[in-house]
Amino acid sequence: MTTSVTTVIARLRREAGLTLEELADKAGLHRTSLGLVERGERGLTLDSAAKIADALDTTLGALIAVAEASEEGVSSDETSLSPRRLPSSVSMNEETLLTLTGLPASAIRSAVEYVYDTLDIIDAELIARGSEPISGLVELANLSSMIGNLVGAGVAESSNDLYVRNRPHAFPDLVPQSAGLPDLEIKTALESNSPKGHLPKEGVYLTFRYCLGGPNGEYIRGKTNRGRTAWIWEVRVGYLGIEDFAISNTDGDSGKTAVIKTDAFKSMAVVFFDERFFPYARAWGGLRPMGTLHA
């Protein structure tokens, strides 16, 4: 694996137009040591690999994932190298987010990147073993649940100890650790679907909606054009009451289902919007397709 990682490092360095000396300086490593590593004359420690990955604007996990895939002859086009890094321009209504949750906009971006990094590593491991990515192995409902769990972990990790995750299947998803902060519930949904749960509960909600596109950000709207890589396109925040949910209890159903009503959902503040993956044909909820002004 070390040989594969160093091969990937050398390739990425050349693609970035960096000399050995420039990469060593960015990574805070000795220039001679990096040269020995690239030539296979010296081993690579995890600490050094992490510093090099950061200098190349990727992550250690993504670096290892791509190396594993290359060992199995998997095309780099099939594996995201995680420049799944988000500009601050995807953040919106930062004051509303801070007021309702105590979280800065950067915490949401970091949580989304945490989801991307984790899914990329899982996908690379699966692809390297001749399997489909995780999105092709589980039902979409289960994928939404998985993404919800990862989002919760990512928000907690990025919250600077303001929140911790609750035990599984317990309300709320995120438990505040400071006085004055609310319980936080997280809901996820695919594309243009409204987030839902089993029972309506009053409180502050973070909703995450995602779509399925290509590993390098390719996306064409429509079910028949779904790709294999999950991309979060929208995050909203807001306080919801019991009356903001539509409750169904159909015979034969596994139990009650509480869907956030459309008007209530639209009234929630958008705090993250990646317009590349907007799944609507027309403007919706204050957002518009890429290339047009926000409503």
Image (spheres, rainbow, N blue to C red):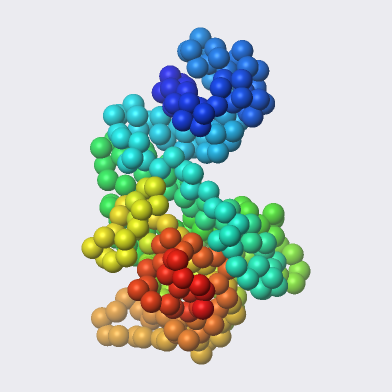
Q: Position of residue 171 (x, y in %)?
A: 55, 70
Position of residue 147 relative to residue 52, above or below, is below
Nearest the eye: 42 or 126: 42
Q: Quadrant of the N terminus?
A: top left
Nearest the eye: 293 or 216: 293
Query: Which residue is located at x 47 percent, y 33 percent?
Result: 63
Extreme bottom residue here?
Answer: 243
Residue 271 image-quadrant placement: bottom right
Q: Position of residue 110 (x, y in %)?
A: 58, 53
Residue 180 appears left or right of 202: right
Q: Position of residue 248 (x, y in %)?
A: 36, 86
Query: Which residue is located at x 43 percent, y 60 percent?
Result: 276
Position of residue 167 relative to residue 122, above or below, is below
Residue 256 image-quadrant placement: bottom left
Residue 21 appears left or right of 180: left
Extreme left residue here?
Answer: 224
Residue 95 appears left or right of 84: right
Q: How many marks?
A: 0
Residue 96 image-quadrant placement: bottom right
Nearest the eye: 8 or 151: 8
Asked if residue 79 shows in the view, the reply is: yes
Extreme right residue here?
Answer: 179
Residue 106 appears left or right of 245: right
Query: Which residue is located at x 44 percent, y 84 percent?
Result: 262
Q: Position of residue 254 (x, y in %)?
A: 32, 76
Query: Which residue is located at x 42 percent, y 69 percent?
Result: 289
Asked if residue 47 shows in the view, the reply is: no
Position of residue 66 relative to residue 156, above or below, is above
